[in-house]
Image: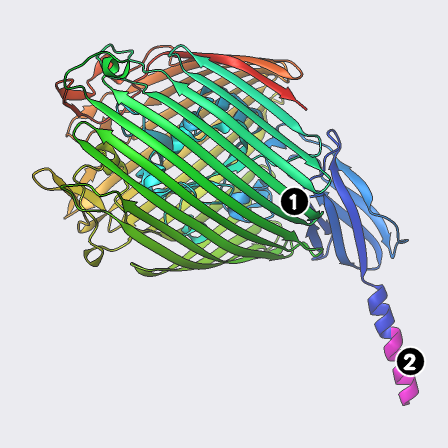
Amino acid sequence: MNLKNITVFTLMLLSSLVNAQNTFEAYIFDAQTNTALSGANASVKGTAVGATTNQEGLLILDNVPDGEQTIVISFVGYETREIEMTFPAEKKEPSVIYLFPKGEEMEEVIISATRSRRTIADLPTRVEVISGEELGEKGNMKPGDIRMLLNETTGIRTQQTSATSYNSSIRIQGLDGKYTQLLKDGYPLYSGFSGGLSLLQIVPLDLQQVEVIKGASSTLYGGGAIAGLVNLVSKKPTDEGELNFLINGTSALGLDLSSFYSNTWNKIGTTVFVSYNYGNPYDPADNGLTAIPEFNRYTVNPRLFYYFNDRTTLEVGVNTVVEERTGGNIDFIEGEPVEDAYFERNNTERITTRVGFDQYYLDGSYLSIKNSFSFFERKIEIPDYVFSGDQFASFNEVAYNFGSTEMEWIAGLNLNIDRFEEDPNPGSQLVDYNHITYGAFLQNNWSVNRTLSLETGLRADYQNEYGFFLLPRLSAMLNLSEDVTARIGGGLGYKTPTIFTEDAERIQFQNVMPIDVSQTEAERSIGLNLDVNYRTELFKTIDFSLNTLLFYTKVEDPLILSNAGGEFYEYTQPNGFIDTKGLELNMRFGYSNFKLFTGYTLADVNRHYGGEVTEMPLVAQHRLNNVLVYELEDNLVIGLEGYYYGPQELNDGTTGQDYWIFGLMTEKKWENFSIFLNFENFTDTRQTGFDTIYTGSISDPQFRDIYAPVDGFVVNGGVKIKID
């Protein structure tokens, strides 16, 4: 073969190869609402070619081979579509393809906390989501904060740390609240000093969904996510626009006023959330001390979005929260003259700025840049003692997501700053600290085949006072059949020591000595979990699902608050560890307009110090959640709830009594308007009804552990208005 023939043959071969690679473009929309589906998956059947839709629902499949091909388009909660096409096809504008919902599964969505573009059903990491109508119903019960959203979830408890001021923290699987990381749209904004009142200062009206990941998550988000993380996802602007109002009142004379607005104009979008929350001092036990403190809180959160094009977005936001909260002697709070009155006053100011930049590329990859600055001031005052200070925190991250639906990669760098400066306090040592953490992470999501998917991650952190941490993580998902899915995962974690724990919060940080860094190590952990999910139809009429989670977490070098002699307290690290092991069991039955949810938690949490094993205080080893709901879609919701808490070991060596809590929720809906009325704890279960909350006198109360409700039976009701 001469040179001329070789050249012609080579050109023909190259032309053939080029022509064999085609591009398929389409917009994927919801067939009922005509809205774009971001994160829908598409692939060419029998090949490795795949892609994911962007925020506008645009799908671009490159390198489609010549000939007859089947395009498979899927999205969790929707019917899968298969489209037969012959390539090369005539060049034309992207078509519009509609997917039809599959009913109950509509609530499953893209999970932002995992940093992946995959849907919840495709993730090897187990994620629980509260969204849609469930989020609205739970939000109706306590519209002023998010405690109810979390406390009714299996395996999670909001632990009250103050008998009079209502302060609470999140406990996952029985571990102390310091091991749970609370995020807002992926930003870690509630840690350290600012974490003590965070649950009470977050109003849920502007939330789109709440994501919960239980178990080791430090590979994704660094220190503090040993027990797991909770990510609060905010609503974003929509083309249709949205204006919501909520007015709520309680039998305890509380008031909640909230409004949320969103809209877009060409390249500009905005959301504005404003709320006012008021609590009247309330003493259902008539013991002279508040179960609900007096508080006034104002929240303003505007966010501005600029859309450079359909793939590039800049977001800028500011969140401001100002609150005055006073609990204690109710006569004193109401202005009566009282001698030697006990009180606890918390005044807080929180200002957080956020900037986010997202760039999506035609190949499905995207770049994310985040920055936040948080300024938090808090002053805690009790008789003869004041603890106050300023916290500055900053979160900075650059992350890049690339690859295909079968082999997805997420790489990133971040810088976290957490600085606390205590106001001068005579007679005590300042507990200032300045923590700087440099981090890098790499995560891979690999769909090995139809049966097996893997998620592997590695994080490297350098902390300026506690050194270097290497945190691997591995999760696997097995699709054993159409009805059975199993997930197994584990990873390492760590927690940087600070004085801001539940134990110190209970004593208002009084006489707590600073941490000696030279004598302290960071707490380290290992966590494992196994999750099996089964779904079927019973008797061809009842939808049934069963989810079982087995978990184990071990925390080495736990930091505990001990008496240092006299009135002073110091943090020490005993020779030993803390571990939690157990299971979560969730069952769901659906028949016609009825749904029954039953959840059981077994949490065996123990301290292993010096060869001795003792139970962790304030952990109900057995807990039962039951919710029966009758629902006429977009018309009426009635729900009956029953929660059981088993006996709990207390810090004073006694055992707290087991108890039940019952509630009734109702909501009547119209097109743009609804009325809700809830009877929370209508059996009036209170710790003050069967036990004491303090010893000593009312002027100098020595508070015991709070392991049961103190506010008792409370009725709340109101209206919600939605203007599209």
- Secondary structure beneath dot 2 equals helix
Amino acid identity at mark 1: Tyr
Residue at left offset 60%, top offset 23%: 244
Residue 574: x %, y % from top left: 17, 49
Verify CB contact (< 8 Å) between mark 1 and mark 2.
no
State whether the magenta stretch is mostly helix, strand or loop: helix
317 left or right of 626? right
**Disc on res. 8:** 2
Does residue 423 show up magenta in the picture? no
Q: Which residues are magenta?
A: 2-12
Q: Is residue 6 visible?
A: yes
Q: Nearer the viewer, residue 586 or 330?
A: 330
Q: Position of residue 561 (x, y in %)?
A: 19, 42
Describe the element under mark 1 as helix, strand or loop: strand
Toward which corner of the image does residue 549 lie, by quadrant?
A: top left
* Above or below for 376 versus 621: below
Magenta stretch containing residue 11, yes or no?
Answer: yes
Q: How is the image coloured?
A: rainbow
On the image, numbered disc 1 is attached to which residue? 306
Q: Left of 404 or right of it: where is 180?
A: left
Quarter that holds the N terminus: bottom right
- Looking at the image, which is closer to me, 616 or 259? 259
* Residue 149: image location, x then y, percent: 45, 27
